[in-house]
Amino acid sequence: MELINDINQLKQEVRANQICLLYIQAPDCGLCSIMLNKIEKVIGSFDNVHSVRAEIHVVPEIAGSFLVASAPTVLLFVNGKEIYRAGNFIDTVELNQTIAKWSMILNCQS
């Protein structure tokens, strides 16, 4: 998962990819590290998901631009529109099901 330190680049990644997962973490956050490992395992089974991460203390504009109040937070975008949001203890089963559903929908449209 690529680390991005620029709000404009984050927005561009979201717009440029059909399915994009944004993971937002905080410094010295044990839960953020644990959830990052779990999220990476989930997205590892999908080759059509582009994933990026950002650290909220490095890119504080994330809070306003993406309406993020805490870390860790996962945002999933399809064609630039947010379709899934979860924070703190992220349900990886639900995330996996959401990605699978949208992957299937987008494959049927192709």
Image: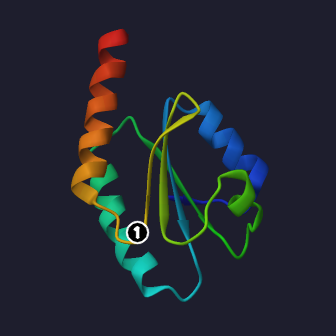
Q: How many marks?
A: 1
Residue sitting at 26 percent across and 47 percent down?
96
Side of 106 relative to 72 (left or right): left
Across and down, in percent, residue 58 comes to 73, 73
Where residue 38 appears, as percent x and y from the top left, is 30, 66
User: What residue appears at the point 43 percent right and 86 percent down from the top-left corner?
Assistant: 30
Say which of 98 and 58 sits in front.
98
Name the image quarter holding residue 63.
bottom right
Q: Is residue 54 visible?
A: yes
Left or right, 109 with respect to 74, comes to: left
In this view, the residue in front, 81 or 50, is 81
Residue matched to label 1: 36
- On the image, the x and y values in percent for residue 75 come to 50, 51
Amino acid tagged 1: Leu
Quadrant of the image occupied by residue 42? bottom left
Image quarter of the C terminus: top left
Q: Secondary structure at mark 1?
A: helix
The answer, for residue 44, to whether it is visible in the render is: no
- Crowding around mark 1 (Cα neighbors within 10 Å: few <14, some 14 to 19, many 20+) is many
- Give above or below for 4 relative to 9: below
The answer to whether residue 94 is left or right of residue 25 is left
Q: From what the image shows, is residue 43 above or below residue 33?
A: above
Up the image or down, 14 lies above or below 61; here it is above
Colour pattern of the rendering? rainbow
Query: Residue at image x 37%, y 20%?
Result: 106
Q: Please identify the quarter of the rendering in which residue 93 is found.
A: bottom left
Location of residue 53 with respect to 98 vertically, above or below: below
